[in-house]
Image (cartoon, rainbow, N blue to C red):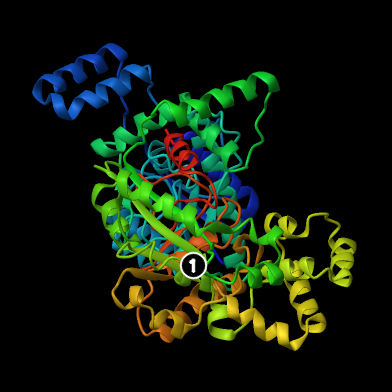
Amino acid sequence: MKSILLITGAADRHRYFAKKLYDEFQTDLISIISQKLHNTTFVSKSEKIKKLFSLFFKNPFKTIKKIIFYIFNSFYSYKENIFQNSNVLFPDVPVNETNDINSNKMIQLIKSIKPDIIIVFGGKIICKEIINIPKIILNSHYGIVPFYKGIGSSITAIGRKDFRHIGSSIHEINERLDSGDILRYAQPSLLGNETAEKIIKKVINAGLDAYIEVIKHIRSGRNIRKFKQPDYGKIYYSKNPEGNFYADKARIELRSNNLLKYYQKVGLIKENINNKFSYKITNKINKLNNRFFNKKIRNGVYVVLYHHIESSLDNIVDWKSFFGNKVLSKITTDSSILAEHIEYYKKNFTVISLSKAVDVLKKYDGKIPDRYLVITFDDGYKSVLKNTFNILKKIPFTLFVNGNPILKKIGLDRLRIGYFLQNNYSKFIDNYHKVFGNENIFDDFKNNFTIQKASFVRAYWENLVPEKDKLKEMDFYLSIDDIKNNETFKNGFLELGNHTYSHCMLSKVNLLQKESEIIKCHLELEKAFEKKINFFSYPFGGYKSFDLVSELLVMQLPWVNAVSAYGYFNEYYYPTNLQRIGFTNQSTIFVKSTFASYQ
C-alpha cells in the first residue's frame, strides 16, 4: 500500500476534499498539512468605485475597460464558502497547520513522514525541496493546462470565449507553476445557464472526483499514461490585470447567455423552443439582417474548409458513377462556385497561409487588427489540385491528407459507403441495417461513428468488390508524387497537414488507436514528404468528434497546430483547436451571412 500526505488549504473546499480523501483511503492517509488562510478583506462597492476612478485619472486608457466591466457586473465580490464542510474531523490522522508550507520546519516534518505520494490541493506554490521528497507529487488545478495556469483558470477560459476548455487538470508538480506532466482532464456537465460561482464549484468537484480515480490508479500499481505539456499557454493570477480583465469579461459572457448559445450550437444541448413559430420568425429575421443589411464582419482569422472540387474539365462521370452523386453532393463544391468564393475572399479579407494565421493569432491573441482568411481542403482528393490550379494561382492554401490512401493505398470508409450505395450492394446495405439498425447509412456513419462500423465497411469491401474497382478507387486520391511534383507545393503556396490514417472519429477510439492515427501517421507522413508537417485536422471535425485526449496527443507534437470544423472564427490562439467553417456550393451571399452571424 502507498502512504499519502495531503497538502491543502483551510477553506471549505479544501476541507471538503480532505474528507473525501479520508473516506476513500482512511489509514493510508497518514497526514494532512493545512495552510492557514490569509486575512482577506472584501472590498465594498463604494470602495471599489473610488479605487477604479482613482486609477482612471492616473491612467484612463488602461482602466476604462475595467470600469465598464465592473459597472455591468454589479461589482460582485467572490466568497470562499461554496463548499459547506466547516466541521470535518479526521480520526487518527494528524493535522498540522502552518503559515508557510515551505518553511524548514515543514520540510523536515515531511521528510520524517516519508510519504509515497503527496497530494496537493490549494495553498502556496511548493518549493523544490518538498517536490523532491516523494516518488509522486500531484496537483489538481481547476483549469485546462497548458492553456490556463494560475488562479481562476476556467473562468478565464470563459472570458476568452474558449468554452471548450472549461475543466480541471490532474498533473505532476515540477518547479514551474502548473507545468508538470498531465495525467487526466476532468470536465463538468454544464447546462450553460450557471453563474460563474456554480461553474467553479462544478469544475472543482469534477476535478476532485478525477483526482481520487488517478490516486486509485497509481496505488493499484498500474501504469498511467502521462502527457508532456508543450511550451505554450499563460499564467493568470488575481493581481494580474489580464487575469482580472478576463474574469470580468466572463461574467458578461455568462449574463449574455453566450455559453448556453455555444452549447446549443455545437449540439451539446438541444434548443428549448417554446414557441416554434416565434423562433422561426426570429431566426429568419436574423438571417435576413446578416444577409442584406450589410452587417459588419468582425476582425479575426476565418478558416474555411472544402473537400472534393467538381469541374467540367474533370471527368465528373467517373466520380459520380463510382461513389454516387448522393454521397458526393455532401462534400462537393463546383469549381465555378469556389471561384466566386475566392473572389469574395480576396476583396473582403487578407488571404493568408495557415502558418501566417498562426503567427497572427500568437502575436495579437484577442486583439486581431484586421480580417484574415485561410483556405483549407480535407481528405486529399485528386480533384483539389487538378481543378483549382487557375482559381488558386498564387493564393496560399492547406491540404490535409489521410495516411491510408496516400501511404498504404487504402481508400476511406466514408466514400466506400458511397460506392456500395451507388452500385446497390444489397448484401452490404441489408446487413448494415440489420447489425446497426439505421436508415441513412452515410449520415449514420458520420454522426454515429464506431470502430465496429468502420471494420464492417472494410470487411465487405475486401469480400465483395471486384479487383478492378479496388484498383480504380486509388484514382481519386492524391499520391505523394502528385503533391511533390505540383507547382504550388514547390513554390510554397501549398502547405500540408495530417488528417489521420483512416478518417476515424477520434472520440470513439481507444488511446492506442488515437496515438496511431495522430502521432504515428503524422511522423510517417513527414518521413514520406521529407519535411516537417505543421498542421493536423480532426476527422469529421465536430465538437464531439474529438476529445481532450485527442488534443493531448496533438500536444505531443509541439510544432503542430490542429484545426476543427464546427464553425466559428478565431480571435484567440488555441494551438489544438483552430476553428474552421465548412462550405460546399453555397452562394457568396450565404458565405457573407455566415461570417456576419459570428458576433
Q: From this viewpoint, is residue 117 visible? A: no
Up-down: is 318 above or below 377?
below
The residue depicted at 78 percent of the width and 79 percent of the height is 459
Nearest the eye: 130 or 519: 519
Picture quarter with the N terminus: bottom right
Residue 119 x %, y %: 48, 56
The residue depicted at 69 percent of the width and 61 percent of the height is 325
Q: Residues within 10 Å of mark 1 (few under 14, many from 20)?
A: some
Residue 94 x %, y %: 50, 49
| Identity of the residue furthest to the top in this view | 46
Nearest the eye: 544 or 81: 544
Q: From this viewpoint, is residue 55 visible? A: yes
| Identity of the residue furthest to the front in this view | 312
Residue 567 x %, y %: 50, 46
Q: Secondary structure at mark 1?
A: helix
Up-down: is 143 above or below 445?
above
Nearest the eye: 535 or 156: 535
Picture quarter with the C terminus: top left
| Identity of the residue furthest to the left in this view | 58
The residue depicted at 46 percent of the width and 34 percent of the height is 597
Up-down: is 496 above or below 139?
below
Up-down: is 466 above or below 412?
below
**Would you say 83 lies left or right of 304 here?**
right
Give the residue pinned by disc 1: 553
Total marks shown come to 1
Residue type, numbered disc 1: Leu
The residue depicted at 25 percent of the width and 47 percent of the height is 364
Residue 440 x %, y %: 78, 55
Nearest the eye: 48 or 113: 48
